[in-house]
Structures are given as C-alpha cells and as structure tokens.
Amino acid sequence: MGDEELVVLASLLAGVAGTGLGGILGALLGAENRSVACYMLAFAGGVMAGISLFAMLPASAQGFRETTGSANLLAAVGATAWGAFTVFAVEKLYDVFARNRGAEPLSVCISVVPSGNPSEKKSLLRAGFAVALAVTVHNLPEGLAIGAAGSAGAAGGMAVAVAIALHNVPEGMAIAAPLAGGGKGKIKAALIAAAAGAATVPGAAVGLTIGKMSPVANAVSLAFAAGAMLYVTFADIFAEAYASEKKNATALCALSGALVAVVFGGI
C-alpha cells in the first residue's frame, strides 16, 4: 500500500472510526456526564494546535525555502489566514442556512455540553440530526488537513489523523446521545454518527491532490490546512471544552495535548 492510500485510509479511520466510537459511547451512556467529553476535546484541541504550529507551518515555510530560496513566512501566514477565513466563511454560510430553516447555529449544534433537557423525542431527533450535519461540515477541512500533511509524507498525515480522531470521539457522542434518546435506536444512532465522519475522506483526497501538484502547492496547502485546523481549534473546540466547570483540569488537558504534538512533530 502506497503513501497516498495510507493517508486516505487514515482519513477514513479518523472520521468514521473516531466519530463512530463516540457514537457508540454516546448511544450507550447518553448525555448525563459531559466532563470527560470536555477533557477529550481540550486534549485533542491541544494536539491539533501543536501539530499546526510546530509541524505543519514549519514544513510549509521549509517548502517555500526549497522553492524560492527563502523561508517566505509572509506567504505561509497569508495561506494560513486564507485557511482560517475559509472555515469561518463556511460556518457563517451554514448559520445562514440554519437560520432560514429555523434551526440552531453551528456553534450550538456541535455542543457536547447540553444546554437543556428536551422532553420530546422529536426535539431530540432534530438536535441529533443537526449535530450530524454540523460535524459533516467540520470534517471536510479536517480531511483537507490530513491530505495536505500526508502529501509531504504518510507520517505527517497519520499524526494529523490521530489528532482529528481524538476530537471526533466527543463529537460522535454529541450526535448519538440525542438520537438514541429520541428513539432512533442505539445501533442506528452510532451508525449515523460514523457516517457523519466520512466527510474526511473527500477532504483528504483534495488535500493530497493539491499537495502533489508542486512543492509550492504543497507549501500553500500545508499552511492553508494549518489555518483551517487552528480556526476550528480555537473558535470551536477550545470554546466548547472550556464550558466545563473544571477549567484548570481542562487547561492541563489542552497543554498535555500540545506537548504530545511536539513529540509527534519531532521537535
């Protein structure tokens, strides 16, 4: 199996297996205790931020150095900002779509901390499917990050895939818990959660294709994917993780994740 096939397989496992595992846990455990989910989100966010800052961005700058003779940090920063803005724009478009249909915005949909306790099964089912759609939207840029990192070598793609798989577990819980509570059935709820993670695969394919075009394209795609991951991490993952009342423990989990990323990145 070649490097490209390994990266695509890693994206499949990160999306489907990670979200699916969370779906199983959510279907079995329900939504009673979200502290563990917050800790997992914080740890995964730390890993994602660390890989972006300590591995992907330096690799992008090195790519510019090899092609232009200098570490073009301005170009790397510009591509990073482009990636962050793209995810921001996609989320805002989703919010417009949701508002027009009378649904919740994405920031509410992906919440792993329940904001209320709906008594009607219809409300729970609607919430579960809204989360599934939101997670699908999120998994596209995350798959792009796996593919972009993997275009420079399978090891990089695997490291990013591990980080994304970790944070997909609590997202899968957020999908399956309300679906199972709404009467969808535990197995079906877990399968729907796993299906929502499959969007990482087309994202990874796009990242691989762009990254393989040329050294410059690879450098740009790495920085773009890093920006996308950083935006998701700081705007969504950390914001949600810090909804936990035990903020010191959450911060330690985030720091631990960043240190793990440093080890993975070989820094």
Image (cartoon, rainbow, N blue to C red):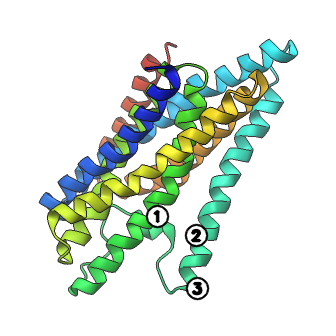
For residue 100, the mark is 3
Q: CA distance from mark 2 to mark 3?
A: 10 Å
Position of residue 139 relative to residue 183, above or below, is above
Residue 90 lies left or right of residue 76; in this view the side is left
Q: Amino acid at mark 2?
A: Tyr
Q: Which residue is nearer to you in this view: 58 or 218? A: 218
Please name the residue shown 41% across and 33% down the image: 9
Other-residue count near label 1 (Cα within 10 Å), few / some / many at <14 / 14–19 / ≥20: many
Of the numbered discs 1 and 3, the one sitting upstream in the chain is 3
Other-residue count near label 2 (Cα within 10 Å), few / some / many at <14 / 14–19 / ≥20: some
Please name the residue shown 35% across and 75% down the image: 127
Other-residue count near label 3 (Cα within 10 Å), few / some / many at <14 / 14–19 / ≥20: few
Of the numbered discs 1 and 2, the one sitting upstream in the chain is 2
Q: Which residue is labeled 2 in the image?
A: 94
Label 1 with label 2: CB-CB less than 8 Å: yes
Q: Which residue is labeled 1 in the image?
A: 134
Please name the residue shown 32% across and 53% down the image: 194
Please name the residue shown 56% across and 82% down the image: 99
Answer yes or no: is residue 258 visible.
yes
Q: Amino acid at mark 3?
A: Asn
Residue at disc 2, secondary structure:
helix
Q: Could you tell me residue 201's position as x and y percent?
A: 48, 44
**Screen quadrant of the N terminus:** top left
Position of residue 158 relative to residue 38, above or below, is above
